[in-house]
Every structure is written in structure tokens, then in C-alpha cells.
Image (cartoon, rainbow, N blue to C red):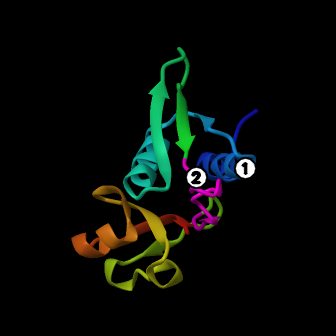
Amino acid sequence: MAISDPIADMLTRIRNGGKAKFVKVDIPGAKIKTEIARVLQAQGYIKNYKSIKDGKQGILRVYLKYTDKNQHVIFGIERCSKTSRRVYVKGKDIKPVLNGMGISILSTSKGIMTDKQAIREKVGGEILCNLW
């Protein structure tokens, strides 16, 4: 079955895996998903990730992270840009998520980065999702 929004599918698998207390989730691979996983790991929202070759498009295995009280580190994920409605923002118009308690992940001309990195680089782009 074809997935109409692969990034939303990735975020949903991470959200559902966290609610079900899974150690890892497997996601169909893509370069943009690997870059999003890289940002999530750098920001401390996931433990690790790895790409697995399977002769097709590959599998992205994401290892989820939990607190000492066995709560998922990601409390909320919101997909901002959709296939039907893209959300673009200029570098100077980027707003913090929950007054800086969360992050936005943007697709910019300089690659996938967080809102704080985009402000520092003075570059705008498409807001892919918000996490807190």
C-alpha cells in the first residue's frame, strides 16, 4: 500500500511506539527520514537510529528514549506541512515551540535543521513538524 505522507507516517510510528513502550520502531527508509532521525538524536529525543539495507528502499530503525520513570521523552508530535498544504517561514519569522520548550524541524536550502539552527543561520524553509 502506498503511503501518501511518509513523514507523517514516520512521526506516527514514533508516537505510537512510545505509547506502546517499544524499544525500537522500523520505518521504511528515505534520505529525508534519516536526516530527521539525525536531528532527533542530536536534540535528545531518540537514543539512536540506523539504516538497514534490505534490497529495496531500506529500513530506518529508530531506538526510542524513555525517562527514568519509563515515560516517553517525546510528549507531543505535530505535523505542520502536509502534502496538501505546505507551511513556509522566513528566517526572521520563525516562532519558538512552547516558548522554547520544544523544537521545530525545518527543511531549508542548507538541509534539515531545528528552528534554533535556522535562526542562527538566518535561513527559512518549510516547517516539517513540531516536537515537545
Q: What residue type is labelled 1?
A: Asn
Label 2 sits on residue: 66
Q: Residues within 10 Å of mark 2 (few under 14, many from 20)?
A: some
Direction from residue 44 to residue 10 in the image, left or right: right
Residue 35: x %, y % from top left: 41, 46
Q: In this view, does 29 lie above or below 123?
A: above
Label 1 sits on residue: 16
The quarter of the image holding the C terminus is bottom right
Which residue is painted at 53% across and 14% down in the image?
55
Residue 124: x %, y % from top left: 35, 71
SS at circle 2:
loop
What span is in magenta? 65-81
SS at circle 1:
helix
> For residue 110, which numbered disc appears in the image?
none
Q: Is residue 13 at all visible to an observer of this figure?
A: yes
Contact? badges 1 and 2 (CB < 8 Å) = no
Q: How crowded is mark 1: few (under 14 residues within 10 Å), some or many (20 or more)?
A: few
Q: Nearer the viewer, residue 64 or 98?
A: 64
